[in-house]
Image: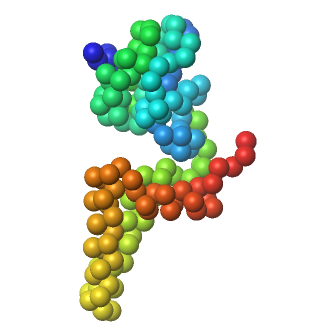
Amino acid sequence: MSLPSISPTEAKRLIAQGARMIDIRAPDEHARERIPGAENLPVEGLSALQGGSGIAIFHCRSGQRTAMNADKLARAASCDAYIVEGGIEAWKKAGLPVERDRSRPIEIQRQVMIAAGGLVLLGALLGRFVASEFYVLPVFVGAGLTFAGITGWCGMAKLLALMPWNRAVPA
């Protein structure tokens, strides 16, 4: 079972007629940038849509997550459902409105990429110009990322989530 894809402009038309826009990204991604009126229901915890009448339209950042989870999304929807082709990125390219909150931190996944890349670069430079013992830093980061990929548990992400800039701000 799969879901048909629709263009961002077709999605906008259906929303104007009462369709539900559902953002399946993580809450930190949704908090920073979202389609106006989109509900945030992360795919990881989605089992069934509550109040499932009408039309449901699912989106993610690029369309890849929705495509990969199309079967799960179809089972969760007890109504007609669609996927926005190209996700919020295509929505923006079509000139459609988005709400941005730049006061919110960038998503944890991107913070992990920045931190890991920075540590690997730092370790490589220090290993080359200061002491070869610093080469252990990129090896340690690489091992951590490999472990995270295999198990789904990322210590760096857990640590970054505890940082002051990532703590939830009361609404």
Q: What residue appears at the point 28 percent right and 66 percent down from the top-left corner?
A: 143
Q: Can residue 39 be spotted in the picture?
A: yes
Q: Quadrant of residue 57?
A: top left
User: Is residue 89 or residue 3 the one in the foreground?
Assistant: 3
Picture quarter with the N terminus: top left
Q: Position of residue 86 (x, y in %)?
A: 35, 30
Residue 88 seen in render: no
Residue furthest to the bottom? 130
Residue 151 location (% of width, % of height):
32, 51
**Residue, x 34% and y 56% (percent of image)?**
148
Residue at the spot 55% in from the left edge and 17% down from the top edge: 50
Nearest the eye: 56 or 7 = 56
Q: Quadrant of residue 146?
A: bottom left
- Quadrant holding the C terminus: top right
Identify whether 14 is placed above or below 91: above
Left or right of 149? Residue 61 is right
Residue projecting furthest to the front: 151
User: In x, y percent, where is residue 16?
Assistant: 55, 12
Where does residue 169 sit, x and y in percent of width and height?
69, 49
Q: Nearer the viewer, residue 50 or 2?
A: 50
Placement of 61 over or under 36, stated as above or below? below
